[in-house]
Amino acid sequence: MRIHRTSAAKSIVAAFVAVLLFLSGTTLSSAALDDWTVLVVKDDYQPAKFEPVSGAYLGAYVIQDEFIKADMNTFNEVTGKQHASYFRYVGYGKPFPQTWVDSVIAAGAVPHIAFEPNNGLDEVEDNAYLREFAQAANASGVPIFLRYASEMNGTWAAYSGDPKQYIEKWRLVHQVMEEEAPNVAMVWTVFTFPEQSITSYYPGDEYVDWVGVNVYNVVYHNNDLRNRGDKEDPLKLLDYVYNTFSARKPIQISEFGATHYTVTDNSYHIDFAAQKITRMYKWLPTLYPRVKSIFYFDVNNLVNAPVGRKINDYSITNDPIVLNAYKNIVAKDYYLSKVTEMPTEPRQELLSVRGLHFDNKGTLYSDVDVFRQFLGLKVDVIGSRAIVSSGAFKKTYTIVSKSIPKGFYGDTRRVKGLPVRAIANDFGYKIKLDISTKTIQLLKK
């Protein structure tokens, strides 16, 4: 125990020294400033439908949890927390799930429907079926999250492969919902990877209410003992989507799961699941304030997944250690138990950026897009230099580039960095630091 305390003390001292040097302008030849989070307050942010002012809606998928007989009230009881929303999958062409929606409402929650055109996009039309589905959603009288055609950036969905058609059909569904079901918030959800195709499927800000991402922690990828995933940080798996869209849209973690048993090695990984769950839910409030809802995927895929995917057990109710990890971490007030109408007037909103910063000789650098998206500055890159402008003032800085681990598959992200402190000083920002959370907030002077 003494060793652990000494190690923690050393970490705090190192962070404190790094901060002092950062503030004084002195460089530090170490990685002490790596993995910090930059926070910025955005004025005149336009909130989305049902977006909470603070906190995140707590949700789950339990319809296939045989251990609790798929009962939402039982799930609330065993986790010690009322959940704000529950979700289920509905194939395009299937009727609106009225009975299930009624049971969600009876459990004190609101529905989240993953609406999937599993026969391809050609069947999606503005017709009687889609209009009646929307009208039924409206008649429910409660907010509904409609997650249409998610994980399109992968290769496993019937609606993947044609971004142009995908966007066309998304906008069609959005238009119908806007006309028939104003209580529906459209959620555009991708899988964590592949990243390179994600933005090509984005329908546009005016057609999307929330942006979602599905995140899973597994010990092995694709049932392959040689393809380990046990070192992957659930927060890093979130970073790309979060950094790309959170400045303008609330983020929903539409599905999150951590395996505690896998057939790949026929072994239990209880501590693995408990640690990943704890890390995800512990740090969202501080480091990812734009995550406004999260849904746990409470399913034993060994029983419930299609053939070929019966690999991992993500359920939390059948193991007391995993259940207690979830129960303890979601107990905090930050995780909201009720979805309600929220103010839609423009407001101030706290933004954050993760995974796009690095230390270079004691100086913190952030990617050029951070200054564009989060500070609203114009940045023109010309070779190894960047001209940064606010309109009234401009200055040229030297770009320092570095490859940063993405957090999965050993991939890296090439970051073109600019000095945070120098730009903050030059463009009228003061810096507020919190050593305990490794956050740097930029505040207008």
Image (tube, grey):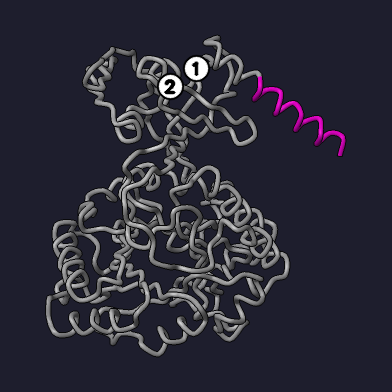
Counting from the top left corner in percent of width and height, residue 6 is at: 81, 30
Placement of 388 over or under 104, stated as above or below = above
Residue at (41% x, 20% y) in the render: 424
Nearer to us in this view, 306 or 246:
246
Nearer to us in this view, 98 or 161:
98
Residue type at mark 1? Answer: Thr
Residue at (53% x, 63% y) in the render: 336
**Dot placed on the residue nearer the N-terminal end, 1 or 2:** 1
Query: What span is in magenta?
Result: 1-16
Residue 410: give its label. Answer: none
Quarter of the image holding residue 77? bottom right
Residue 420: give its label. Answer: 2
Counting from the top left corner in percent of width and height, residue 114 is at: 35, 72
Residue at (23% x, 54% y) in the render: 201
Within 10 Å of disc 1 (Cα), the crowding (few <14, some 14-19, many 20+) is many
Counting from the top left corner in percent of width and height, residue 208 is at: 26, 58
Residue type at mark 2? Answer: Val
Residue 363: give its label. Answer: 1
* Secondary structure of the residue carrying numbered label 1: strand
Left/right of residue 115 with respect to residue 332 in the rendered view: left
- Does the magenta portion include 271? no
